[in-house]
Image (cartoon, rainbow, N blue to C red):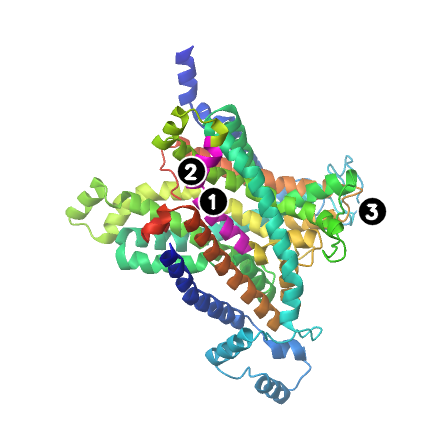
């Protein structure tokens, strides 16, 4: 097990290198650069060249990437043009909000999906199974913002239970903080329930057909005990991988929800920095989202290995 | 009784279900309205009418006016054009690039498969939405940029499906027979692989059209797709949100249009695959 985990960690290093370089390179390909953003067309050609040399932008892409990387490893990602704030500081301010959103939404999604999947899988083709699969099929076609708009309409406009927008920091008031997190988290969670349920349901249904479940039933164990203690663990590894992929993509990808509910997370920072062409901020945000994506996926793989001994033995089993 | 049931189950509608027929009807309706929007007795989607904005339905404005006094129905119908064009064109990119490379990877296997699959893994392990945002923000909010951006994103999933479908029939007897009869690789692919892969791939691509429509709506919603005043379903939802209190229909109608269209595409794809004796889409 330790060997497999080390293997995953070692594999992550080159992936991180490739992904971070590619994202640096792709942003570099976009038209315009920091100088055009700073000058806004007001500088002379000589002035632009001087500024470019001053910022080191006249060097090759690899040199600049290595420079960026060594800065990043020292926690220095440069400064935002818009307000001179250190990029790393902006990231540190926005990241906790996104992480909180991610954790709460995944907990809600799993808390709904796991029991539903168990109910469906224990009677495949039954009423509960058909209703659940029809509903989840529909959920896959709903745009995230529609869920957000409907929830906002029902719970803040009509019922006035939760605030529509606005964010309270957890240090200011934990209760208010949770209240402002409820609608955004549920919005995100509902989108995931359908997928999670579908994946876990088919794995559970396959597990339930195996001999050791029949033995457990013959021993007279209760259905609920069998589901939670015997069937869940061997069935959950693909769900964990999927949660990893989703959590990873949420680091920068939750921007829709963050925009609707005005949560100051990484997604909002991403959209703001892209629309204001704040290159160093974009660079920093993309670095955090890509690295976060890879790291979370590796963590998910490790959790899956820890839970499922079958994944420990051979290299092929995981893929 | 049992006989009648069986006969119904094997008929076209019974086989695919009422949901399938409804989905096809909705898609045809949306497509026809989008194509012939100019011929319909509708006010121009950007024409600001006199009279109170955000007012409810009337004889002249069947779905009322939006916050700026423009006809909501007209904007819904013209907005569908963007969704359909982006959905179809970006899927075409995904199908051509992803489909061909997927069939090549699946057919040749070994090193070819390994290298193409490695590229697809890199593709899939990027935060794609962030790159889509950056692309559109820096290259301009034009239909062509949106189509290319979403098209590139759809290459990965199409590649995987095409590759797995091809692997599924690569070692079948008819492929081996075609190879043994001395056909070139191109002819084998055309005569033995295509007929088995293309139909399922096309049916699956309806799902891709749906995700492309969702992605465009998302971009529009945050103001990074085709800019206003051009109506898109996504920017209609966005501008409707500010009037959520007084007129929730302004945000809900375009949301529902997106939902029904994407749902119909998914149901249609599912129906075609499960009842058309097509292969299951491999994961």
* Residue that label 1 marks: A239
Residue B122 among those drawn in magenta: no
Q: Residues within 10 Å of mark 2 (few under 14, many from 20)?
A: many
Residue nearest the observer in this picture, A55 or A220? A220
Q: Is residue A47 left or right of residue A62?
A: right
Residue A9 in view in this figure = yes
Q: Is residue A121 above or below residue B283?
A: above
Quick check: marks 2 and 3 in contact, CB under 8 Å? no
What secondary structure is found at the residue carrying circle 1?
helix
Q: What label sits on residue B50 in the rendered view?
A: 3
Query: Residue B149 placed where, x, y %?
Result: 52, 58
- Quarter of the view holding residue A213: top left
Query: Residue B282 placed where, x, y %?
Result: 38, 42
Pick out the residue farthest to the left.
B181
Quick check: marks 1 and 2 in contact, CB under 8 Å? yes
The CA span between labels 1 and 2 is 9 Å
* Residue that label 2 marks: A203
Q: Read off the magenta span.
A: A226-249
Q: Is residue A7 left or right of residue A156?
A: left
| Chain to which mark 3 belongs | B
Return the disc, 1 or 2, that comes first in the chain's sequence. 2
Residue at mark 1 shares a chain with residue at mark 3: no
């Amino acid at each position: 097990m330790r060997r497999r985990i080390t293997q995953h960690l070692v594999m992550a290093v080159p992936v991180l290198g490739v992904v971070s370089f590619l994202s640096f390179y792709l942003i570099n390909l976009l038209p315009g650069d920091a100088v055009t953003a700073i000058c806004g067309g007001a500088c002379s050609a000589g002035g632009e060249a001087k500024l470019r040399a001053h910022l080191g932008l006249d060097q090759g892409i690899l040199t600049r990437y290595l420079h960026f990387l060594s800065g990043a490893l020292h926690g220095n990602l440069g400064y935002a043009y818009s307000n001179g704030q250190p990029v790393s500081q902006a990231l540190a301010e926005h990241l906790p909000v996104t992480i909180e959103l991610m954790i709460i939404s995944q907990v809600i999604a799993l808390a709904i999906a796991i029991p539903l999947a168990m109910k469906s899988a224990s009677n495949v083709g039954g009423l509960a199974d058909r209703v659940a699969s029809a509903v989840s099929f529909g959920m896959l076609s709903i745009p995230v913002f529609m869920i957000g708009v409907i929830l906002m309409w029902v719970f803040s406009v009509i019922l006035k239970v939760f605030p529509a927008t606005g964010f309270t920091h957890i240090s200011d008031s934990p209760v208010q903080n949770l209240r402002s997190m409820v609608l955004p988290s549920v919005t995100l969670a509902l989108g995931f329930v359908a997928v999670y349920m579908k994946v876990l349901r088919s794995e559970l249904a396959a597990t339930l057909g195996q001999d050791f479940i029949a033995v457990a039933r013959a021993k007279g164990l209760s259905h609920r005990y069998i589901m939670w203690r015997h069937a869940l663990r061997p069935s959950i590894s693909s769900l964990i991988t999927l949660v990893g992929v989703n959590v990873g993509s949420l680091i920068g990808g939750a921007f829709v929800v963050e925009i609707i509910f005005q949560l100051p997370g990484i997604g909002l920072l991403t959209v703001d920095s892209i629309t204001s062409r704040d290159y160093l901020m974009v660079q920093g945000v993309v670095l955090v989202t890509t690295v976060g994506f890879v790291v979370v996926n590796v963590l998910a793989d490790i959790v899956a290995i820890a839970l499922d001994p079958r994944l420990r033995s051979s290299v092929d089993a995981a893929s | 009784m049992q006989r009648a049931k069986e006969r119904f189950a094997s008929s076209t509608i019974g086989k695919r279900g009422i949901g399938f027929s409804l989905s096809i009807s909705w898609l045809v309706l949306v497509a026809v309205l989008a194509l012939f929007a100019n011929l319909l007795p509708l006010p121009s989607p950007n024409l600001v009418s006199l009279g109170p904005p955000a007012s409810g339905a009337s004889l002249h404005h069947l779905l009322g006016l939006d916050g700026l006094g423009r006809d909501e129905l007209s904007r819904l119908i013209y907005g569908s054009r963007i969704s359909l064009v982006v959905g179809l064109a970006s899927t075409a990119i995904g199908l051509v690039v992803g489909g061909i490379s997927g069939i090549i990877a699946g057919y040749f296997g070994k090193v070819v498969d390994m290298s193409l699959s490695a590229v697809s893994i890199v593709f899939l392990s990027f935060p794609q939405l962030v790159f889509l945002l950056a692309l559109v923000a820096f290259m301009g909010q034009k239909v062509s940029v949106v189509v290319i951006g979403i098209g590139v994103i759809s290459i990965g999933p199409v590649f995987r499906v095409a590759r797995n479908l091809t692997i599924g029939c690569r070692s079948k007897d008819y492929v081996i027979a075609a190879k043994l009869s001395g056909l070139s690789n191109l002819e084998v692919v055309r005569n033995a692989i295509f007929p088995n892969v293309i139909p399922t791939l096309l049916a699956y691509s309806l799902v891709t059209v749906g995700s492309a429509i969702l992605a465009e709506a998302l971009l529009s919603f945050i103001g990074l797709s085709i800019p206003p005043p051009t109506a898109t379903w996504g920017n209609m939802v966005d501008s409707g949100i500010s009037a959520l209190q007084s007129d929730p229909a302004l945000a809900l109608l375009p949301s529902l249009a997106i939902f029904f269209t994407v749902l119909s595409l998914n149901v249609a794809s599912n129906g075609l695959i499960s009842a058309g004796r097509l292969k299951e889409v491999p994961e």
